[in-house]
Amino acid sequence: MLARVLVPMDGSTLSEHALTYALENHPDASVTVLTVVGEPSMMMGDAVSLAFEDDLETAATERAAEVFDRAREVATEHDAEIDTVVAIGRPARAIITRADDYDAVVMGSHSGDVIGRLFVGDVAETVFERSPVPVTVVR
C-alpha cells in the first residue's frame, strides 16, 4: 500500500484523470498535487512574463491557483483532501526531483495543449524513465 502519492497537474483533462485515478486507487494515501510553472526564459512563451515579476514565487503561486482550485474540486468529489505544491522550472526535472519524497507518481500521459500534443508524452516519458519511484501513466 502506498502512503504518499505525487500527482503532477497542468490543468489538462488527462492530468485530472490522473488525480481521479490516484484518489480512487490509493484512498488511504496522502496525495500531493504538483504544478510546475515554467522557468523564465525567452523561449518559453507564457513563462517569459515571469521574468518581469518582482516576486517570482508569488507569481508562480498565482499562476498555479486555477489548477489547484480544480484539483481541490476533484478531491472534494471523492471526499478526499489533497496537499498542493508549486515548482518553477522544467516540468520533468521538477517532478523527478520531488519524486524521491513519495512512494509513487501518478500522471497523465501528456499535456492537453497544442505543444503537448506535438511532443506527446515527452514529460511523461522522461519521468517514467528517470523517476526513482514507480510511475503510473494514466490516459
Image (cartoon, helix red, strand yellow):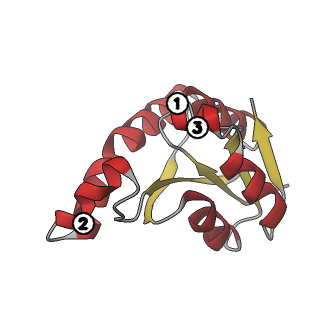
Mark 2: give few (<14), some (14-19) or many (20+) Cα within 10 Å.
some
- N-terminal-most mark, 1 or 2: 2
At horizontal 70% and vertical 66% (from top left) the residue drawn is 102
Q: Position of residue 122 (x, y in %)?
A: 69, 48
Tag 1 near tag 3, CB within 8 Å:
yes
Name the residue that disc number 2 marks: 51
Name the residue that disc number 3 marks: 116
Tag 1 near tag 2, CB within 8 Å:
no
**Residue in front for this viewpoint, 122 or 67:** 122
40 relative to 15, above or below? below
- Amino acid type indicated by mark 1: Val
9 relative to 14, above or below? below
Question: Which residue is at the far front?
Answer: 43
- Amino acid type indicated by mark 2: Ala
Q: Which quadrant holds the N terminus?
A: bottom right
Q: Quadrant of residue 131?
A: bottom right
At horizontal 71% and vertical 34% (from top left) the residue drawn is 21
Q: Where is residue 53 in the image (x, y as percent from the top left)?
A: 17, 65
**Residue in front for this viewpoint, 89 or 108:** 89
For mark 3, give the secondary structure.
helix
**Residue 102 appearing in the image:** yes
115 relative to 8, above or below? above
13 relative to 68, above or below? above
Q: Distance between the residues labelled 1 and 2?
A: 23 Å
